[in-house]
Amino acid sequence: MQDALLALNAYWSQQGCLVAQPMNSEVGAGTLNPATFLRVQGPEPWRVAYVEPSVRPDDSRYGENPNRLQTHTQFQVILKPEPGNAQELYLGSLKALGIDIDAHDVRFVEDNWASPALGAWGLGWEVWLDGLEITQFTYFQQAGGITLDPVSVEITYGLERILMALQGVSHFKDIAYAPGVTYGEVFGQAEYEMSRYYLDDADVDTNRELFEAYAKEARRLLDLRLPVPAYSYVLKCSHTFNVLDARGAISTTERARSFARMRGLAHDVAALWAERRAELKHPLGTATDPAGPDGAAGGLTGAPGVAGEPGAGAAAARPRPRTLAFEIGFEELPPAEATRVVEAVREALESGLGASRLGHGALNVLATPRRVVATLEGVEAHEPDHEQTVRGPRVSAAYDADGKPTQALLGFARSQDADPAELGRGEFGGREHVVLTRRVSGRPAEEVLAQLLPTVVSGLRAEKNMRWNASGLSYSRPIRWILALLGDEVVPFSVSGLDAGRSTRVHRTAPQPVIDVAMADGYVELLARHGIIADTGARRSAIESAAVRLAAQVGGLVDLEANRALVDEIANLVEYPTAILGTFDQKYLELPDQILTTVMRKHQRYLPVLDQSGALLPYFLTVANGACDQDVVRRGNEAVLRARYEDAAFFWRADLETPLESMQERLELLTFEDKLGSMADRAQRIADTATEFASLLPMGARDLITLEKAAGLVKFDLGSQMVTELSSLAGVMAEVYAKQAGRPEEVAQALFEGELPRHSADKLPESTPGALLALADRADLLAGLLPLGGAPTGGSDPFGLRRAALGMVNILRAHPALAPLTVSTMLRIAAERQPLDVTDASLEEAQQFVVRRFEQQLLEAGHSVHDVRAVLAQADRPVPAAGRLTELEAAHGTQELAVATAAIQRVLRIVPDGTAATPDPQLFSVPAETNLHQAIEATRAALGSQPDLASFLKESGPLVQAIDAFFEGVMVMDEDPTVRANRLALLASVLRLTTPLLDWAELK
């Protein structure tokens, strides 16, 4: 290991980094060292590299776990401002460590970093070496809650992981630290004793006192305007908090309070540091704009003048249409953005081209993680010439009584640089105006594209956007190159200092990573010859074909349908998929399949291999990016999976030794939401809410007993080590551990089903107890979080409330026996158990939130918007509402529905809202009033207490006739206010009978 540290120090020193020293106090990561946290503030340039022993008490494992240490070794690099080629510099550092990046599969996989305690965040990647995360690579956006300008790159190496991979050892103790000395021999004792201290022996009271003392001292030093010593005490606060947390001594409220306190201190330190550096006139100078001092980086520049002249010549020499190849090159996009950017670029190009007159053929847009490529066929040399008519003043104002031009006409002519004699006349809106008609020459294609293409680049936006060294640009990841070729000519333009050209970048490990492109035609095929498949669909097909072929070699198969989303993600992680079959020790098959496959899919993006009966085989499929030494990559991925499974086995054994009740007690230490208490509080609310739901239903004794037992354990698995590590197994492990503990099968099933559905395509609870727990869970989320402002905004839904609302609807629709439970009733019951006051307005908002999800679901299923809105009045009970929609659609085209709708809508138009349906028959003065009243009562009697639409339409004939006769023979708005009010009340009786069936106003 010491050789690796020396190699990294030497390499980064050669790149202009100052070699700093570790912090002389415990820190949880290299980020917390002042050489990072403080130095990324302000405008001073800063390049630094240093080793940082990183102390994380919660990772203590007594030295037993092969991959978890309470103190691990990070190597930290900060490049400020980010240089524009940080990825290439990083790959050079791997070579310096002796890693053959041509043989290995090195990938940048989306990972967005945040430290709430420090008010810091950034976007970037985990760097994988044959599936092993070895580095965190982040573009810092904020630290201490302060936006950073310029942006810094942080590169954090995990040295133990890298050395285990390079040395081929499976336990950190076996790492060769120096010649003849192992890591375990040097640090094993400290690992055990510090684990003992953090997990068992740290005195809670003493550490509480230390936390308080450190926080007070940090504040005192801030008041003295001493940010450096103040920050040292913030770090002591952080470590002391981590010690208390590892001891299980931090309550929900204390956690929230402590985090807020540390975040506030960190912010004040960062702000004061920046002030002090400004007072000192920035001794290290200020970072220059990477785009140059002329400010060109701030905007986008088309080059119509430059493009116009060559374009005109090209048009004369080359009248035939040409192909446009337009590529925007990125550092690796998140998989979801690689999908979204295709539509964003397509829409921008179609919109811009549609606003021009430039003729063209088919547009094709493709994307990989590193590029989006648009090809436009048949681009004409010019826009066609066209006539432009400009409207001037009205003729009556353009000439005086003698027919001479007025000042209005002369002024119009001057503004158009035209001779008044050239003006004509035209009619607009029935009035004659003076007009100027001129012939406008079409712009050259180069000019049109030079104005359009930069707006496409600058207009890109993602769900999460970042800044880098291109002022004025903001996107998911940095944009590093632009290719724009029309035929064999560059379309000249610039965006934030980035010039369009004819160069593109292929694989970083290629002999020539940057190549020049001669012409646009065949560009996608050119990429393919360089090992880049631009079409996502083609990459997906290649992955699927290879998965089927390789799995068959060991008598297995890959369930491609079940892994559809994963295959889509993998396709957007690579530019050229190289599928590799790996294996793992059969002893791990003793673990539940759910654990093994979750580790494969979620953490490693592996495809599990099954036998013909669906049982898991000891094989997996990984997909590397491009050419590599497949044996090396296979061994690396097998080692990674082995380490992951060792972790899982460690958690599994520990959990099996822990009573379910003890796991449940740990929920007290898990924060749900500051104002809503701990996860234990939430679990109790869910249990109580589900029990009350059950009291409203005709349930059998067996189901009631099952519900009672499951409610007493709801969410307990969140206190298990397995779910703490693999949160997606929540519910799954509840079922597994409940069975292992001897709980009844139906109780275990209900505990699992209480988490369903976890996503839109997930299965629904099958048992009634499971359905009630799931409904209670979602009602608690909606009733508690919506009043706190947790409603989704745009694409952001941090609490999953849309999913919760839709889950509630789907569960109710799947269980007609739960029809007595209305959405509003469930929300009210859940609201009564919240530790805050939930107003009627908040409950109405929550109910409408669920209704809107139901409405959207029906619309997406293809139902007419008018029909859906007509039944939404019944949406508080989704099953009857869906049934009413079916009735309505069946009635379309019938005479009964048409005449009933016309009659009832006529009533709706005349009756004011809020009119009481209390007519007095003694005030009827004409037969039509009496007839209508009798028709209303006769229809009501025929329909009974729970009418359906079909029955109503069958019985509605006499009522419709009576309504028509009433309007023909009665003056509703009589001059006598008493008569008028009684007639409106009679019509309101029609609405009281019919509006529970449908919102008739919505029908067409």
Image (cartoon, helix red, strand yellow):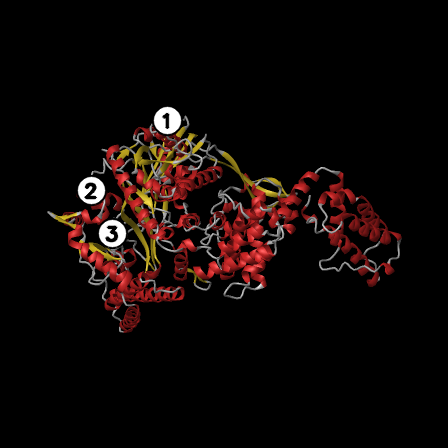
Q: Amino acid at mark 2?
A: Leu
Q: Counting residues from the N terminus, which is met first, the one under dot 3 or under dot 1? A: 3
For disc 2, the marked residue is 166
* Residue 719: quarter of image: bottom left
Q: Nearer the viewer, residue 949 or 392?
A: 949
Q: Counting residues from the N terminus, which is met first, the one under dot 3 or under dot 2? A: 3
Side (left or right) of 360 relative to 921: left
Label at residue 691:
none
For disc 3, the marked residue is 64
Q: Nearer the viewer, mark 3 or mark 2?
A: 3
Q: Nearer the viewer, residue 204 or 30?
A: 204
For disc 1, the marked residue is 317
Q: Nearer the viewer, mark 1 or mark 2?
A: 2
The residues tagged by marks 1 and 2 sit, at their Cα atoms, a distance apart of 59 Å
The residues tagged by marks 3 and 2 sit, at their Cα atoms, a distance apart of 21 Å
Q: Secondary structure at mark 2?
A: helix
Identify which residue is drawn at 78% across, 45% down. 956
Q: Position of residue 317 (x, y in %)?
A: 37, 26
Q: Counting residues from the N terminus, which is met first, the one under dot 1 or under dot 2? A: 2
Within-10-Å neighbours for mark 1: few <14, some 14–19, many 20+: few
One can see residue 313 in this view: no
Q: Amino acid at mark 3?
A: Glu
